[in-house]
Image: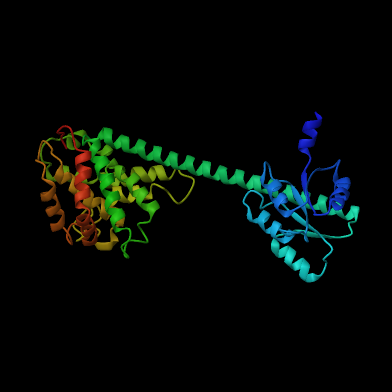
Amino acid sequence: MSEGNTAAAKPTIVIVDDAPENIRILSSILNGVYRTKAATSGAKAIEICNEGEPPDLVLLDVMMPGIDGLEVCRQIRGNYKTRDVPVIFLTAKSTMEDERKGFEAGGVDYITKPISPPVVEARVKTHLELKSARDILKSRNEYLEQEVARRTEEIAVIQDVTMAAMGSLAETRDNETGNHIRRTQHYIKVIALQMSAWPEFSDYLDRGTIELLYKSAPLHDIGKVGIPDSILLKPGKLTVDEFEVMKTHTTLGRDSIMAAERLLPTQTSFLALAREIAWCHHEKWNGSGYPRGLSGTSIPISGRLMAVVDVYDALMSKRVYKSAMSHEESVEVIEGGAGTHFDPNIVEGFLQVAELLKSVAKKFADEAVVSR
C-alpha cells in the first residue's frame, strides 16, 4: 500500500484552538495514528469542516475570540454535511454549567486543560469507534431502505403485470373492444377522485384504493372467458336461458380471481378489489341485480362504482344489435337510474364529472363496430 493511501485511510481530526502551542501539543499526540488539520479560529474551523469530505472528529477549544467554540459546534451540528461529526470540547472551564452548555450545543465529550495525553488518546479512540459503529449502522439502514424500496417497486410491477395479463385474457376472449376496458378504468378513477373528499367515502377512497380501482377495473368481465361462444358471440338478443348463462360470468370471474389469490403468500390480496368488481358490478341498488340480489350499501363500493361506469360505456357504445346513445342521452339514463339501479351518491359524483367522462370517451373512442 502506498504512503498516500495509508494517509487517506487514517481518520481525520480537526484541532481548533487559538493558541498555536496547544495545537502543537495535540498534533504531537495524535500524528502517526491520525491525520490532523489545524485551525486557530472558529471561522477557519467551519471552513475546514465544510470543504471536501467532512472530518471524522473535531477537538474544539471553547474560549476563542470571534466565534467561540459553542457556536462553532452548533454550526457543525446544524449542517447536514457535518451533523454526524463528533465534537469534543477542550477547555479550562469544568463546572457543571459549562458542561451543560457544551452538551446542549452538540458536544459529545469534554477534555479539561491542562491536557493529559492518555486522556486525549483514549477519548479520541472511543468516539471514533462510536462514530464508526454509527456509520456502519447508518449504511446498513440506508441499504435496507433501498432494498425495501426496490422490493416494493418490484412487487408493484408484478401486481401490475398480473392484472395486465389477466385483463388481456379477458380482452381476447370477449370481443368487446379493448377501448371499453380503457374507458371504464379511466371513468372509475375520475369519479372516485371526485368523491374522495366526501365524508361518506373519504375513508375508503384513499389514493392507494383509487389507484387499485383503476388497475382492477379491466378485470370486471374476466368471467366471460367461461361463457360458451354460442352465447358470448351471439350477434342478436339472448334468450332467457342464454341470459341466465351469461349472468354466470360474475361468479366465474370471482372464482377465477379467487383461484389466483390462493396462490399468493399473504392473506391481504391486491386482487380483492378486482374480485369484488367482477362479482358485484351487476348488482343493483334496489336489490334486483345479480348474482346475489344485494341491495344498497351491502353492495361493495367498488361494485357500485363499476356498475355506473359499465352501463354508461355500454350506452355510449355501438354494437351490431344496438345503436349508440349520445353522451347527453346516456347521462340522462344514469341519472334516471339513481336509487333503483345505482347508488344515488355515486350518480351525483358521476354527474359532477360528466364532462370529463365525455372527454375520456372521445379520447378512447372505438374505431369499428363489434358484436356483443
| Horizontal relation, residue 108 to residue 195: left or right | right
Residue at image coords 76%, 36%: 8
Q: Residue at x 75, y 50 (%)?
A: 57
In the picture provided, is 250 more to the left or to the right than 6?
left
Residue 116 in the figure: left or right of residue 274: right
- Looking at the figure, which quarter contains the N terminus? top right
Nearer to us in this view, 117 or 204: 117
For the point 82% across and 43% down, the residue is 34
Residue most toward the front? 66
Left or right: 19 as drawn, with respect to 241: right
Percent x, y of residue 253: 30, 44
**Rendered view: 144 above or below 18:** above
Residue 100 picture location, percent across and down: 74, 68
User: In terms of depth relative to the viewer, which is nearer, 349 or 88?
Assistant: 88
Q: Residue at x 31, y 43 (%)?
A: 219
* Residue 284 visible, this angle: no
Quarter of the rendering occupied by the C terminus: top left
Answer with the quarter of the image where residue 195 lies. Answer: bottom left
**Front residue of 272 and 134:** 134
